[in-house]
Image (cartoon, rainbow, N blue to C red):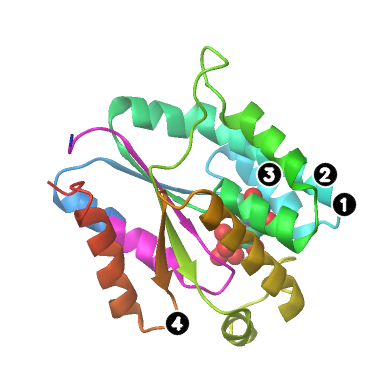
Amino acid sequence: MGNSGRFITFEGIDGAGKSTQVDALAQLFRGVGRTVLVTREPGGTALAEKIRKLVLHDAMDPLTEALLVFAARRDHLVQLIEPALARGDVVLCDRFTDSSFAYQGGGRGLDLAVLSMLEQWVQGGQAPAGGPMRQPDLTLWFDLSPAQAARRLAAAREPDKFEAQNEAFFARVAQGFLRRVEAHPQRFFRLDADRERALVWADVEAAVRSRGWLE
Ligand code: TYD
């Protein structure tokens, strides 16, 4: 069991501090001899990284944005994620489809039924089509209040299109994540991200260890 492919995603509003925890978890898995792919969305492949630049910096309507993030996701899944899981590797992905439901759905108000359809198309059976939908085995949800996130972002570097949004936008994004957690409770592990990094890390490690994935 310990050696099968694992797909772990990291989610939360901007400023929640996911990135350093992704790297730390990669180190932990490598330390027990696992091959780890660290990747992110939108992005991960050359094509998807080009799409990322458009999505993060160009103004567009919410449906265009959703179509682009799912196009990037499709390329990422087909080229990188599915082959890695088939080899039995651990895939750590900074954001995945829950972010589309939170940002395009919650933040920008796109119809969730449209997002569900895109999710089915993009994640439904890679080859042959029509197989079970690909979903993460575990999603670490970095839960941070929109007010706290806004304070952290104000102190951060040059904001991208999303980071420059106001607190009301982040409140809708946070609501969007909450709806996904309620819809898929077994896949999510909630982390209180309003604590110092070492305490958050202890919970990340415990979430993975308790599943027997480090043996
Ligand atoms: P993020 O991954 O947080 O990168 P960085 O830390 O370098 O800013 O930023 C990606 C942004 O893209 C983030 O604001 C959320 C947004 N996003 C969407 O709107 N929809 C999606 O489906 C994904 C994956 C991300």
Res 49 seen here: yes
For disc 4, the marked residue is 194
Kind of residue sitting beneath label 4: Asp
Answer few, some or many: residues within 10 Å of disc 1's Cα (few below 14, many 20 plus, some between 14 and 19).
few
For disc 2, the marked residue is 64
Task: Determine whether the residue tagged by mark 1 lies in a helix, strand or loop.
Answer: loop
Q: Quadrant of residue 206?
A: bottom left
Kind of residue sitting beneath label 2: Thr
Answer few, some or many: residues within 10 Å of disc 4's Cα (few below 14, many 20 plus, some between 14 and 19).
some
Kind of residue sitting beneath label 1: Asp
At x 46% / y 68%, what residue is drawn?
Answer: 142
Q: Which mark is residue 61?
A: 1
The quadrant of the image that shows the N terminus is: top left
Q: Is residue 115 above or below residue 183?
A: above
Taking the image as shown, residue 15 lies to the left or right of residue 53, namely: left
| Position in image of residue 186 (x %, y %) | 40, 49
